Image (cartoon, rainbow, N blue to C red):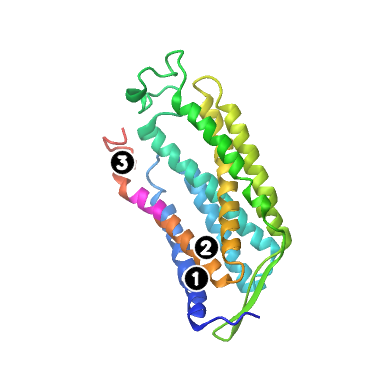
Amino acid sequence: MILFTPFEQYLAFTSGLIIKPIYMVLVLGILALARKPVFSGRTTLCIGLAAFWLGEAACALNFLSAGGASDWLDGMHDLGMVAMGIFVPWGLLTLFDTQVIGFIDSQKRCVLQRFCGRCYKQHDVPCGLKRLMIFAALFFAVVALLPLTATIAPYDHLGTVFGSEVRYTYSPFLIWLNFRLFPIIAAGCFVATAGLLWGAATAPARAKGPFFVGLGFWLFSWFRFCLVTAFARTPVWLDFWEELTELLITLGVGLVLWFFRAQLRPTSPAAR
């Protein structure tokens, strides 16, 4: 039993009953905002946000009905965050590549062509950005394996928040998933990305799938690894930083769609 300080008890209350409801409502608002304009990457982005919302709903249900001890519900929460890490960046990159960058589409002029001179899409020349991306994918494949060094041990703390017992727990099975299976999946996807990037102008389009799958598993595994390692004995702070980070990510996605809402309208000159 951990004796939480009064400040930590307020922190736990804020994390679970203020921050989490705010960003769950915000996600629903973003989904409503993204419903009307049909822009590139919209479906992918909405899938990521919906999966994230369902995962957070499973997390809340786990806390309310099982005292945080349900592996099944906690696993759904983890997979929701993984899905967000896959589909939300995928949707946003699709949006910006279609509107601005033009790198993935083999038929579009890349925004970097003015810098590069001749483009590999039209001429038999190497693409500097593509070669850099191959190196980046292999780099990510290596660093994604860092959580493999973590010890597989239960994370289980019990404390009292304003007279009610609160349990912060991750079972050895979930720790194994986060620190063993997920890093290996991420590394494999990044290696596949590097291999698929070799080839013709259609290579980036082929490689984006495994890249974003690897990105989702990598980001979540690293995120959980950093939190569990940093706050091994202070679970209230682990929960607070997880909830705050999710709020900021949700807010960031919402601000992107709001700031560029005029450009996302199909009838606007900027969208055309």
Percent position (x, y) of residue 18?
A: 46, 72
Q: Amino acid at mark 1?
A: Ser
- Nearest the viewer among 41 and 266 is 41
Tell which circle, 1 or 3, labels the residue nearer the N-terminal end: 1
Q: Amino acid at mark 3?
A: Gln
Distance from label 1 to label 3 (Cα)? 35 Å
Around disc 2, counting alpha carbons within 10 Å, would you say few (fewer than 14), some (14 to 19), or many (20 or more)?
some
Q: Are marks 1 and 2 in contact (CB under 8 Å)?
A: yes
Q: Are marks 1 and 3 in contact (CB under 8 Å)?
A: no
Percent position (x, y) of residue 199?
A: 55, 20
Tag nearer the camera, 2 or 3: 2
Percent position (x, y) of residue 127?
A: 45, 22
Residue position for label 1: 15
What element does badge 2 sit on? Answer: helix
Q: Amino acid at mark 2?
A: Glu
Residue position for label 2: 242
Residue position for label 3: 263
Looking at the rendered image, the quarter that the C terminus falls into is: top left
